[in-house]
Image (cartoon, grey):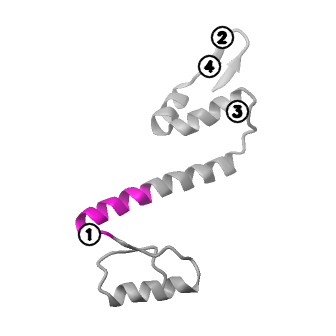
């Protein structure tokens, strides 16, 4: 995607395919073309991967909860997480999300 003084916004086939795969990526490309953001492909790709990963993780958790009942969620990320995980296992939890062992 680029800006042309005569044609305006020029969109390639690759840009259209990127749009079909991820609208956020196209929005970032538009901001870059307008000069509103400086392209940092590594940081942008990392943020995009993280966002897509969280969405995918939530989708998988929904599927697992539909199949195996509600998950016991371990919310802490400190030493208490280990105890919460062990307690959930002792209680017979069928599904433990974000457990720490």
- For label 3, the SS is helix
Residue indicated by mark 4: 10
Q: Mark 2: which secondary structure? A: loop
Majority SS type along the magenta span: helix
Instruction: Name the front one of labels 2 and 3.
Output: 3
Q: N-terminal of the two: label 2 or label 3?
A: 2
Residue 66 coordinates in the image, percent (x, y):
26, 62
To which residue does mark 1 refer? Answer: 69
Residue placed at 55% from the left, 30% from the top?
15
Residue extending farthest to the left is 67
* Quarter occupied by residue 25: top right
- What is the x, y in percent for residue 11? 58, 22
Name the residue that disc number 3 marks. Answer: 32
Q: Do the numbered discs 2 and 4 sit on residues whose CB atoms are within 8 Å? A: yes
**Kind of element beneath mark 1:** loop
- Which sits in the foreground, 84 or 67? 84
CA distance separating discs 2 and 4: 7 Å
Q: Which residue is mark 2?
A: 7
Disc 2 to disc 3, how far (Cα)?
A: 17 Å
């Amino acid at each position: 995607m680029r800006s042309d003084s005569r044609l305006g916004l020029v969109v390639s086939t690759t840009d259209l395919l990127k749009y079909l795969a991820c609208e956020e990526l196209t929005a970032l490309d538009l901001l870059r073309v307008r000069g509103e953001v400086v392209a940092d492909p590594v940081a942008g790709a990392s943020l995009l991967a993280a966002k897509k990963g969280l969405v995918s993780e939530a989708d998988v958790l929904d599927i697992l909860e539909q199949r195996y009942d509600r998950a016991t969620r371990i919310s802490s990320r400190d030493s208490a997480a280990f105890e919460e995980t062990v307690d959930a296992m002792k209680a017979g939890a069928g599904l433990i999300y974000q457990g720490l062992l």
